Amino acid sequence: MQNLLAHIKNYSPLSTEAQQALQDCFEKNSFSKNEYLLTQGQVSRHLYFLEKGATRGFYNLDGKEITHWFGFENDFVTSFHSFITGEAAVENIQLIEGSILWMISKENLTELFNKYHEIERLVRIVYEKYYIRLEERFVNAQFKTASERYENLLLHTPHIAERVPLGFIASYLGISQETLSRIRSKF
Amino acid sequence: MQNLLAHIKNYSPLSTEAQQALQDCFEKNSFSKNEYLLTQGQVSRHLYFLEKGATRGFYNLDGKEITHWFGFENDFVTSFHSFITGEAAVENIQLIEGSILWMISKENLTELFNKYHEIERLVRIVYEKYYIRLEERFVNAQFKTASERYENLLLHTPHIAERVPLGFIASYLGISQETLSRIRSKF
DNA sequence: GTTGCTTTTTGATAAATGTCAAAAGTTTAA
DNA sequence: TTAAACTTTTGACATTTATCAAAAAGCAAC
């Protein structure tokens, strides 16, 4: 929990009172490798904060699993589309390492928003940060070559290359596994 | 201004008082085709609401202009990366039709956040919506073929195909203009 | 309407990336 | 420690998309 509170301070300061309220709403949970936080078709009713471990979001396309994002330490994780809209998720969220995470229900979060302006501010700022992070991934996906995308990964998020199997990284970058293998052999 | 207020209500209701405060902070502006709201290197200090008209965001790559987004009626427009971080923008924002828009400075918006929890809530919700909209574009960019992306455009945002020159659409979809022309001839 | 300018299309070719199949390497667990 | 199950690499080939160049079409101003 100290991780979560410390991390949150990087976004926006919170009063002791709000911190306490957050603490009361977040619940700790441990998961082992390969367990699921969410499977497609379910509605994502929780927001998770990853204290330790690693997750991936993937969906099924023509019988293949397409990993489109990863979550690591200090990431907030959920199926945002489902969490925000209340619709069924098209994606699965799976632990790719044994993990410790903190979860809060959407109901509790909404209540916190009502009680604490500063918590709603915090989340507004988190969305800002996540928005520009996604924007950067989008530009990479659309306008960079496969090699550039991989180089970029090594440069900016090397922990992904270190902790995650090649096949997951390939689909994360939108490349076939074979092509990624060939790209990598050139370094 | 009625457009703006009406549109905002779709996201989150506002008290009369907050509506009035918003009105006092937004300033109306008209631009003619080809004018710029922002050029690369500048810091984006304003958020715009497009009442009428059309804009594009583009950046320069190897001497070519890469259009990566469009804004139309009822869209909020700025270089989000620059607006959020305060860093110089890498993109240009240009009017592609004569347009009417409302602008608010970041300072004024921040003040409104401080005074009105409900306005910060509104913006939190706008970010949520824009986040999942971008997520969808990302998935399309990364995992769909050029034809699928064009079909998707016709299906979900046909106004883009109708109002915007082919070259802009091509780079918006991450396709060369020639390829898009060939794809289109197959319909 | 003709001239000049921009946008779109068409053709030929090249480059990047995907697919399928099999081999090689690594990890896991009985 | 060894077989089974994954994961990664390699090869041959197919497909998609980009690039360059030129022609055609559309549009605007005179």
Image (cartoon, coloured by chain):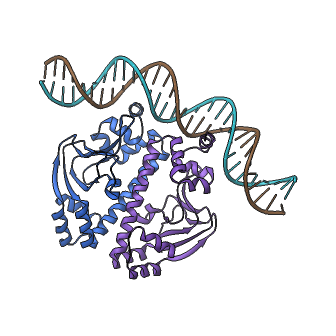
Chain colours: A blue, B purple, C cyan, D brown
Residue drawn at x 61%, y 55% is B162
Percent x, y of residue B123: 39, 68
Number of dots carrying numbers: 0
Image coords of residue B60 (percent x, y): 56, 53
Q: Residue at x 18, y 63 (%)?
A: A25
Q: Nearer the viewer, residue D24 or B186?
A: B186
Horizontal side, residue B87 vs residue B155: left or right:
left
Q: Nearer the viewer, residue A143 or B102?
A: B102
Q: Residue at x 24, y 73 (%)?
A: A115
Q: Position of residue A161 (x, y in %)?
A: 32, 40
The picture places residue B180, in percent across and down from the top left corner, at: 59, 43
Q: Residue at x 29, y 39 (%)?
A: A164
User: If the image is split into quadrants, where does the C terminus of chain B sit?
Assistant: top right
- Which residue is at the front of the view, A117 or B93? A117
Q: Nearer the viewer, residue A187 or A55?
A: A55
Left or right? Give the position of D29 relative to B101. right
Residue D5 sits in quarter: top left
Left or right placement of residue B31 versus residue B46 in this view:
right
